[in-house]
Amino acid sequence: MTAVDPSYRQPFRRNLSNAFRETLRPPKQRINRRRQQVSKASGLKSQVWIIGIVLALNLIGLAMILSAGSVVATYEGQSTWYYFQRQGIWFLLGVLAMVATSKIDYRRIGDQVKTILAVTFSLLVLVHVPGFGVNANGATRWVSIFGIPPFQPSELLKLAILIYTAKLLSDRQSALSESQTFYPPVIIFSAAALLVMKQPDLGTVIIVGGLMVIVMFIGGLPILRLTGLVTVGAALTLAVSMSADYRKARLLSFLHPDNDPLNTSYQTFQSLVGIASGGWMGVGPGASRAKWGFLPFAHTDFIYTVIAEEMGFIGAVTVLILFVGLAAFGIRAALKCGDRFGLLLAVGISLWFLLQAFINIGTVIGVLPVTGIPLPFVSFGGTSLLVSMAAVGIILNIDRQGNT
């Protein structure tokens, strides 16, 4: 009789042993293990949702840029695909940036905050150096180095200020009421605001200041100090708005739009006409009439008008829901994070997208003054898209770290 090799039974015995071991494991350990498995599955699902929402916004943006940008390109003597192709390249670079930052531990990014600030301020200074600064539409907001396509440092400033403020507050949890915690971010912001206002770009200053105050509030800084800071900031913003003729005209046209409908209020009126033309279901892809020379900057600051006209009320609300959903999943990732820095950074990035979207949409529908703030992921603009996608990658990393 042939002897039977007992080795074939080893996998069966090993599996049976593991099954008995799991059965005999104390109930509390089994429950904790099951919770970890459920948490990982839930975390993966939330990351899929975040990526899906961001890709949806980008696809909508590319479609609208092809629609509105083709008209602008035709007027400029370019190919009708010019703006679409440029945004498509930035989108691919943005995807690479999102993947890269999602693989980097967000805590390592926090450790490099001084380097990030140094690079950001260096670029902000280069904007004002002849030979490096690039002027467009009467403003010098871009920098070009060694023939590299123009880059807008003020977009990087938004992320840099968020990282710096979140890192500072997380490191000084025991000294939140001290001046050494309150004044450093205010000083950093003030220096950056002076450089950005020299471009000039008041809209970005408002966004960056608002994000800093939001993170400081969530971080636990005293309410009285923050109230004073907001009051002083609002007063300075009003003063700056009234100091230049074009900014003053924008503000007055917002308060009294009927006084100058063919000049200072022209964009707002044309935007409202385009939105009204869309109705519930829209006039159809590519059929917008506002983009044909009636609405300036239809492919950038006022792209939401083209969305509302071509996709209707349903499409416009869908875009708004996507931004709310992105913010909700970002805040969910923050709440799962056991690290204070990760929590503040994820909330700050999430509210950055939501705040900027609301300001852009508010401008388009006439409930806010014209500020020149783009719609994240949707408006034409390479730097804005690249930095925003990198920020999404940070949220994905925070979400994944919170599930491990």
Image: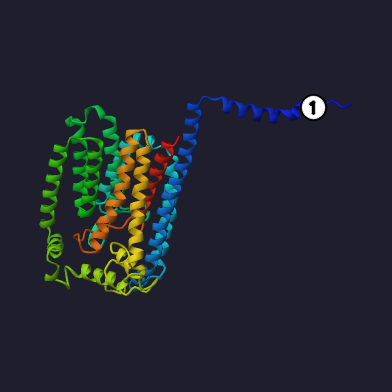
Q: Is residue 2 visible?
A: yes
* Vertical comparison of 153 with 282: above or below: above
* Vertical comparison of 64 with 176: above or below: below
Residue 225 x %, y %: 14, 37
Q: Quadrant of the C terminus?
A: top left
* Vertical comparison of 143 with 252: above or below: above
Residue 165 x %, y %: 26, 38
Q: Is residue 133 visible?
A: no
Q: Residue at x 25, y 63 (%)?
A: 364
Local SS, label 1:
loop
Q: Nearer the viewer, residue 48 or 243?
A: 48
Quarter assignment of residue 78: bottom left
Q: Residue at x 21, y 31 (%)?
A: 176
Which residue is disc 1 drawn over? 5
Residue 163 x %, y %: 31, 40
Q: Nearer the viewer, residue 393 or 52?
A: 52
Q: Residue at x 73, y 29 (%)?
A: 9
Q: Quadrant of the N terminus?
A: top right
